[in-house]
Amino acid sequence: MKPINFYIIYSLLFMLCASVSCNKTDDEVVPTGDHTFSCYINGEFFVPKGSITSSPYHDGLSFLKYDFFNATAKNSVKNAIVYFTIKDWAEGTFNLTTSNGLFQPSDPNDINHAIVGINGIKYLSKENSGTVTFTTVTETDVKGNFEFTLYNENDESDIIHITNGKFDN
């Protein structure tokens, strides 16, 4: 019987451990701090790309804070946009209602709703199909989290799940 080379075994074990222990790629690092947003869309990590913007038609991230709170995050590489509006917002948890299907600037911001657009398909919230929770609300900082189940506007059997959503304006 030939002796087994220790270095070969060590190398094979190292490669095996490295390949199974890495659950996240560098692109899956959850951003923290001001002007950050992340979530999982059906298990796929999503963050907006680009700079802060006020338009849902460009990549990036936008927060609007008036008598409503509105978040728009777009990543054209993933061909996806995540959008939600909460009216009369404050610290606490808010249930979603049936979406009107309108993004900012057309959205009248008079209902709590969410929309996700993926590859040209629009997924909309229904009554109690998700929540947005504001964990911190100050004059200078708004932080929170969200989870949604959304439905294809043309085929209600086509459902997506938005999980582990976080935002910090």
Image (tube, helix red, strand yellow):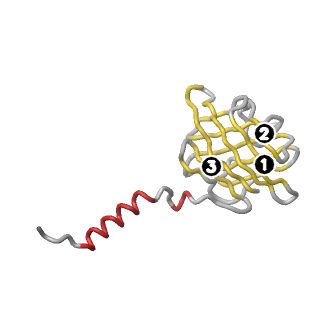
The quadrant holding residue 149 is top right
Secondary structure beneath label 1 = strand
Disc 1 to disc 2, C-alpha distance: 8 Å
Disc 3 to disc 1, C-alpha distance: 15 Å
Point out residue 62 in the picture as x, y percentages from the top left corner: 74, 52
| Earlier sequence position, callout 1 versus callout 2 | 2
**Mark 1 and mark 2 residues within 8 Å of each other at the beta carbon:** yes
The tag on residue 134 is: 1
Q: Residue at x 84, y 60 (%)?
A: 140
- Which residue ends up furthest to the left in the rendered image? 1
Q: Which residue is mark 3?
A: 39
Q: Residue at x 71, y 33 (%)?
A: 101
Q: Amino acid at mark 2?
A: Phe
Q: Residue at x 73, y 59 (%)?
A: 35
As drawn, is 53 to the left or to the right of 149?
right
**Mark 3 and mark 1 residues within 8 Å of each other at the beta carbon:** no
Point out residue 55 in the picture as x, y percentages from the top left corner: 73, 50
